[in-house]
Image (cartoon, rainbow, N blue to C red):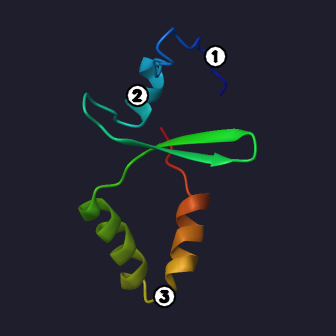
Amino acid sequence: MEITREINEKGQVVIPIDIRRMLDLKKKSRIVFQIQDNEVKIKKELSPEMWLKSFLKYRVKGKSLTPEEIDKIYEQSYDLP
């Protein structure tokens, strides 16, 4: 999916409603910008509780993963709408 938006005079961009719904972004939600090469990735910030739940999910399956391996899995994961 590719959506184009214009940056306003204050340097702001509106996140389209479809994307806000897909990511369950509400007023005051926090997002994270990841910059790599010439690309910017925007994702919903995980609360500490959500991060811990995600982390424990891998531990429950009996896997012994390092923090680096967990980061790699998280980076490569995605949610289906």
58 lies left or right of 30:
right
Secondary structure under badge 2?
helix
Which tag, 1 or 3, sits closer to the chain's start? 1
Which one is in front, 81 or 74?
A: 74
Residue matched to label 1:
4
The image shows a total of numbered marks equal to 3
Question: Spatial distance from mark 1 to mark 2, Cα to Cα?
Answer: 15 Å
Q: Residue at x 59, y 11 (%)?
A: 6
Residue matched to label 3:
63
| Residues marked 1 and 2 touching at CB (< 8 Å) | no
Q: Nearer the viewer, mark 1 or mark 2?
A: 1
Residue matched to label 2:
20
Quarter of the image with the N terminus is top right
Question: Spatial distance from mark 1 to mark 3, Cα to Cα?
Answer: 41 Å
Which one is in front, 78 or 46?
A: 46
| Residues marked 3 and 2 touching at CB (< 8 Å) | no
Relative height, residue 23 to residue 57 (above, below): above
Q: Position of residue 76 (x, y in %)?
A: 61, 59
Q: Residue at x 25, y 28 (%)?
A: 27
Q: Amino acid at mark 2?
A: Arg
Question: Spatial distance from mark 3 to mark 2, Cα to Cα?
Answer: 33 Å
